[in-house]
Amino acid sequence: MATVLLTGGAGFIGSHTALEFLNAGVDVVVVDDFSNSSPKALDRVQKLTGKSLTSYNQNACDAEGMRRVFANCRFDAVVHFAGFKAVGESVAKPLEYYRNNIDSALTVCELMREYDVRKIVFSSSATVYGSAKTMPILESFETGRCTNPYGWTKFMIEQILLDAAKADPNLSVTLLRYFNPVGAHESGEIGEDPLGLPNNLAPFITQVAVGKRAKLNVFGNTYPTPDGTGVRDYIHVVDLAQGHVAAYQHATPGAHIYNLGTGKGTSVLEFVAAFERATGVHIPYEIVEPRPGDVAVCYADPKRAEQELGWTAKLGLDEMCRDAYNWQRKNPNGYRD
Ligand code: UFG
């Protein structure tokens, strides 16, 4: 049976992806240092699928520890999620972000070469497009001009992987550029569990919904959008996770780049209205100053993934809101209960 290594596989997207791989009949090994995730997520993935996975409490930058993981098992592919991901924090701690994110990616690539693992799927982000001039965003759009160190680490790792693919004709590199992942598995057993104050819209709203926060701050209402609030392409994390399985199944030598989004833009106020409709819970909000570095509008053209991977996002805003709320209600303190 085929086996994939998921670095950062206990995190929000990693845990949902582990579940989809197991359901697709692919064995899963996870490395995660649990610095921003919980082993409970992996216990629940195993319970939900009725299948077992192997996990290592292991930082992906630690080459010796990672070598033991590669020596223990022959992997068909690596899906590299591990990394720091908070935009604001990356501005305050750029060196930590560059060291951690670039180092872990290089360590994984070097060990892949050493152990002749020929496929990598990388967790990239729409942030690499910076502030695109036209919408929807195609994979061919220029990248760079990122607005923060986190974004630059994604950009730099993309470049490293593209160069590695050029140098090694046997290597398959797939860059998945995520738009805005939200929601949770429909069981409510796994979901997004940010440490402290959530940076992102959906977990902030679900925390307001369960009474952990008094109100949502809406960052600006004077953007050039229909209601003045920022427009994003929200994608259900289960759809996103299935996109990784499709990318793995279609991986061929060379470099491949896919947007994973729905192609639909939704404003902050539309998201709030959709959440209220889907859950019946009122979300009080206040308009505050725009957040530095935010773009007005960002949504994908996801056609390439449809044509080449046979993948499209199937779940809509209703399911995203319903499932995110279900997870938060069942786990008001995330995995810390
Ligand atoms: N927003 C609020 N209030 C909040 C949080 C967010 O109004 O408390 C707004 C933002 O201004 C933005 C929208 O909600 O208009 C979405 O914000 P998120 O923080 O949820 O997501 P971003 O689009 O800013 O960032 C996401 C990922 C990043 C990634 C980026 C790529 O979190 O990792 O998409 O575009 F880099």
Image: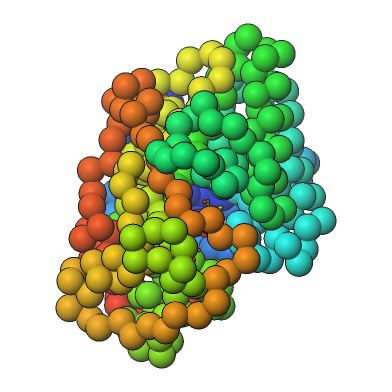
Q: Position of residue 269 (x, y in %)?
A: 33, 69
**In which quadrant of the rendered view does residue 25 lie?**
top left
**In which quadrant of the rendered view does residue 7 lie?**
top right
For the point 52% across and 41% down, the residue is: 133
- Classify 213 as above or below 114: below
Locate residue 335 relative to residue 196 in the image: left or right: left
For the point 35% across and 75% down, the residue is: 206
Of 16 and 277, nearer the camera is 277
For the point 18% across and 69% down, the residue is: 278
For the point 38% across and 50% down, the residue is: 233
Q: Position of residue 46 (x, y in %)?
A: 36, 52
Q: Which residue occupies the extreme right position in the image?
A: 95
**If the image is split into quadrants, where does the C terminus sit?**
bottom left
How many callouts does the rendering have?
A: 0
Of 255 and 126, nearer the camera is 126
**If the image is split into quadrants, where does the N terminus sit?**
top left
**In which quadrant of the rendered view does residue 43 lie?**
bottom left
How does the figure colour the protein chain or chains? rainbow
Q: Which residue occupies the extreme top position in the image?
A: 169
Q: Position of residue 295 (x, y in %)?
A: 53, 56
Is residue 1 shown to the viewer in this render? no
Of 234 and 212, nearer the camera is 234
Is residue 168 shown to the viewer in this render? yes
Q: Position of residue 181 (x, y in %)?
A: 41, 53
